[in-house]
Image (cartoon, rainbow, N blue to C red):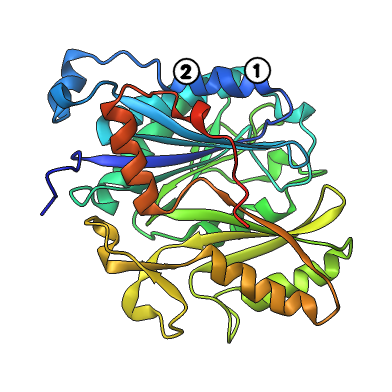
Amino acid sequence: MMSRGTISKLAACLLNISEARNAQVVETIAKATVSVKESQDLASKTHQGSELACRSTVLNIFRDYDYNRSVLTIVAQLPVLQHCVYNACVHAYHNIDLSEQHGGHPRLGAVDLIPIYPLSSDVSLEECGNVANEIAKTLAKDVRGSSFFLFGTADHPKHRGLVQRRKEVGWFAGKHGVQYDKLQQDLGANPSTRYGLTGVGASPYVTNCNVTIATQDVQFGHQIAQCIRASTPGGLPGIQAMAFAHEGNVEIACNVESFLKEKSNTGECLENKSGTIYDHYSYTSAEVIENKVRTLASERGVDVIGTALIGFTPDQALNLAIKALRSEQSEYWKTRTDVRMM
């Protein structure tokens, strides 16, 4: 049951786009996200409309100049979110030419990733998967030349995870020299150098947490990333990790996946009690990730410089979204000034 303070049917998209160095382009995309005009048909699919001062909000924009990559945290009721994300992507495809993009982070698409996550307890993963699928189908029809691969509950009937799908389509090699005509899409046109290949799907919430260490030895960073992955014995639950050269140092970039509590046996996770779908999930906290990296790095006398949480934990996203939507803060990102945690 939902609490009185919760807004029904809330979901989030952490939209990943291959542009960060042109701040005006990123802001144009963010503004397009919250400029959706609600039709009468769309209004009939949403609830609590009279309680909301705005229909959608961009809670955070994380821009990384070195990676040339931005992540927009978009929240709205699920039917509205579909239109918001579609609108953002249309503007992103118009403004970002992947053939001219340079950066230190793997990417295959001008819009690289469209993940849909449930926030309120009355939103299912299946509903999010259906919305993700509709976004991909509509964009494939309206943006000629765009192409998509599917993951999670949008990937019917296999429901393959993002990491598996990225391996299958060659995303991890996606920085230089990609042969786009060799990539395989699930929807849309054959991939091109202009738009590339976009991942679209749905899963339990994933937070991004990056830990920077004071070294230029990327190979050492790869060793640390391998040690902390969930797939490694003794690794951290729900963690997918990579290492990249970043601003003269090395960054351990982590996807922090929400996972069912019974899958955890480490006792190192943050227990959620937020009144959402995530009451049944846990996730490894940023503090645990940083401490693990610090321990491993110290074996070679390397210090941790700092940790950045890209966006929010699921409960933070829900609470901030309720605040923003009820106080007409569609551009909530403008109140955000710092992503460094420690």
Secondary structure beneath disc 1?
helix
Secondary structure beneath disc 2?
helix
Q: Answer with left or right where residue 26 lies relative to residue 304.
A: left
Neighbor class of circle 2 (other Cα within 10 Å; few <14, some 14-19, many 20+) is some
Q: Answer with left or right where residue 106 lies relative to residue 149.
A: right
Instruction: Pinpoint residue 120: horizontal percent, then vertical percent.
Output: 24, 47
Disc 1 marks which residue? 24
Which quadrant of the view contains residue 331?
Answer: top left
Q: Answer with left or right where residue 244 lies relative to residue 207.
A: right
Instruction: Pinpoint residue 242: horizontal percent, then vertical percent.
Output: 69, 62
Name the one closer to the observer, 245 or 301. Answer: 301
Alpha carbons under labels 1 and 2: distance apart = 12 Å
Above/below status of 270 relative to 56: below
Q: Residue 32 carries which label?
A: 2
Instruction: Pinpoint residue 300: horizontal percent, then vertical percent.
Output: 85, 79
Seen at 68% across and 72% down, the residue is: 293
Mark toward the start of the polypeptide (1 vs 2): 1
